[in-house]
Image (cartoon, helix red, strand yellow):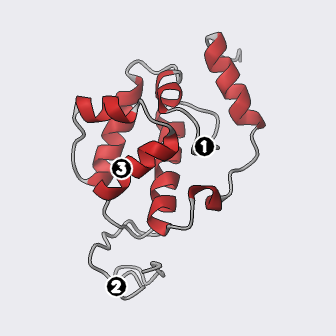
Amino acid sequence: MQQARFRPAVEFARGVLLARPPVPRDVWGPDPARRELAYFLCQTLARELNWPNARFVPGDPMSTLCNLGGVLTPGRAVALAVGDRLDRRMTTAEWSNIETLTLGGAIDALLPLAGRRCTECDYVLDGNVTGTCPECGSPTGA
C-alpha cells in the first residue's frame, strides 16, 4: 500500500511529531484540571486531524496544528469535539481566536470554560470536594 503524500509543511510537522519523544505530563504544569484538558485537547487534535501521535507541547501554534492536518474543515472538527467536552458550542469567532494562540494559550483560554471531569469515567465533578469520583470511585485530586 502506498503511503499518502502531504504538502511539504505537513510532512515537516509530521516528522517533528514522529521524532518528538513522549511529552511528560508535568510540561502542562501542576494543575490537574489543566493537565486533564491538555491531554484531552492533544488526543482530539491527533485523532480529528490525522496527526501521527499526540506529542504536542504548550508552544505548538494552534494555527499549524489545526490547519495542516489535511482534513477538509480542519479546525471545525476539533472545535466541535471541544464544544462537546465543554458542554457548549463554540462560536466561529471564539474558535478563530483560539486558533491564533499556542496550544498552551488555548488550554489556558478554555480552562475557565471546562468543568472538572473524572479522568476515568468522564463524570462531571463540579462541586465535588470529596477527592473521589462518586460514579467510579477514582481519586479526583480535589
* Label 2 residue SS: loop
- Image disc number at residue 54: 1
Q: Residues within 10 Å of mark 3 (few under 14, many from 20)?
A: some
**Looking at the rendering, which quadrant does residue 93 occupy?**
top left
Identify residue type, mark 3: Leu
Sequence-first disc among 2 and 3:
3
- Cα distance in 3D space between marks 1 and 3: 18 Å
Q: Which amino acid type corresponds to the residue marked 2 in the rendered image?
A: Val
Q: Secondary structure at mark 3?
A: helix
> Residue 107: x, y in percent?
44, 49
Residue 76 locus on image (x, y percent):
34, 29
**Hey, what amino acid is under mark 1?**
Ala
Q: Which residue is mark 2?
A: 129
- Going from N to C along the chain, the mark reached first, 1 or 2, is 1
Residue in front for this viewpoint, 81 or 65: 65
Q: CA distance from mark 1 to mark 2?
A: 31 Å
Indicate left or right for 100 with 85 as reference. right
Is residue 22 something that shows in the picture? yes
The answer to whether 136 is drawn above or below residue 88 in the figure is below
Please rate how many residues cluster around mark 2, counting C-alpha atoms within 10 Å: few if below 14, some from 14 to 19, many from 20. few
Q: In the rendered structure, are the residues bearing label 1 and label 2 in contact, judged by CB atoms less than 8 Å apart? A: no
State the count of labels.
Answer: 3
Is 21 located above or below residue 77 in the figure?
below
**Residue 85 at x, y = what percent?**
33, 52
User: Disc 2 to disc 3, how far (Cα)?
Assistant: 22 Å
Residue at image location 37% in from the left, 88% down from the top: 130
Q: Which residue is mark 3?
A: 110
Question: Which residue reaches farthest bottom?
Answer: 130
